[in-house]
Image (tube, rainbow, N blue to C red):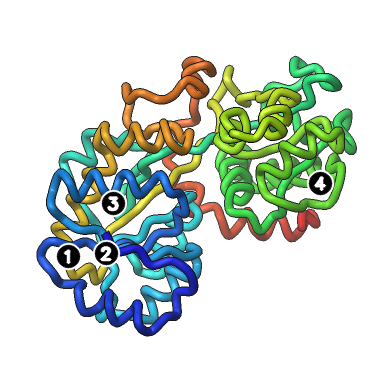
Amino acid sequence: MITFKGKLAVTALAATMAATSVAANEVNLYSARHYDSDQAIYEAFTKETGIEVNLIEGKSDALIERIKREGVASPADILVTVDAGNLWRADQEGVFQPVNSETLNSRLPDSLRHPDGHWFGFSQRLRVIYYDRSEFDPTQISEYEDLAKPEFEGEVCIRSSSNIYNQSLLASMIEYHGEDGAEEWAQGVVNNMARDPQGGDTDQIRAVAAGECNLAVGNHYYYARLLNSDDEADREVARKVGIIFPNQSGRGVHANIGGAGVVATAPNRENAVRFLEFLASDTAQEVFARSNHEFPAVDGVLKNPVLDSWGNLNIDDINVSVLGENNPEAVRIFDRVGWR
């Protein structure tokens, strides 16, 4: 396996990729996922198929721009990224081509697939609510909608509006409550913020543990990482914080995805489709769950003790393509309510 990391605009790396891009036993990945655990998936794919994986890593926007800039000469076969919002943006730029695979259509639920097969979701990321175990009664809140209630003024920590996870959460609120209802909710959350939006998801959890706020919003796997950390201080943070899976009696907890699609100009299309099909295999699905604490996209796949301890969750089954379609309006709402 060839792995290139660091700045994307490295001429030597691009030349190497281009020179090998049409080899019959290779597939070229441009990936915005930066998890060492994904290497295990690449190695398992090569062992099973004999197809070598060439990898370039970068941020989603940079990879999309690179593919556009390279045009028909791009060596990229697959774009891998996180969040339906990023997949939607790539699709809007013409990055993907449709794929009709019986394997993908049968193993992945409709909610995690682009309606026309332009991209597919292979892991699920739940956006949950965290609370201070010592200061907050979790029976007070059971839905995302509750975060906007005036009684929680000054109690909420959350990331900035530029964060794609928050954009997709608001996009889901648009789908369920309309633009006016979503804007009312976003304004309520702004009113309840304990501090200006800052940091990443782990920082929100740490803020709750430190007593800076009683409530926070973040993806579930950041919490699972703290629980399983080799650092006792991390585990202590997790023990101070409780987790709520919102809307269990209704539509279910909001889920987003890690996903991928075949690039429109892919020189190794057949290998690319085989790779996507491998991502839907039990082997790859178990790596997502076991190593990065993501929920599998395929039903019945073994997870890990942390995920299993949360029981059978009601997960929103809205087609995640809607999250991308509603993204522009979500961004406009954030701007209007002053969510920075």
Residue 67: percent from the left, percent from the top? 37, 73
In the image, 96 versus 187, the foreground residue is: 96
Distance of mark 3 from mark 1, alpha carbons? 20 Å
Q: Amino acid at mark 1?
A: Asn
Q: Earlier in the sequence, mark 1 or mark 2?
A: 2
Mark 3 lies on residue: 116
Mark 1 lies on residue: 268
Q: Amino acid at mark 3?
A: Asp
Query: Looking at the image, is 173 positioned above or below residue 303?
Result: below
> What residue is drawn where x is 39% and y is 81%?
69
Q: Earlier in the sequence, mark 2 or mark 3?
A: 2
Mark 4 lies on residue: 190
Q: Which corner quadrant of the image does residue 304 belong to?
A: top left
Mark 4 nearby-residue class (10 Å; few <14, some 14–19, many ≥20) = many
Mark 2 nearby-residue class (10 Å; few <14, some 14–19, many ≥20) = many
Distance of mark 4 from mark 3, alpha carbons? 37 Å
Query: Looking at the image, is 97 positioned above or below residue 20?
Result: above
> What residue is drawn where x is 47% and y is 18%?
308
Q: Are marks 4 and 3 in contact (CB under 8 Å)?
A: no
Distance of mark 2 from mark 3, alpha carbons? 23 Å
Q: Amino acid at mark 4?
A: Val
Badge nearest the viewer, 1 or 2: 2
Which type of secondary structure does the marked residue at label 1 adopt? loop
Mark 2 lies on residue: 28
Q: Are marks 4 and 2 in contact (CB under 8 Å)?
A: no
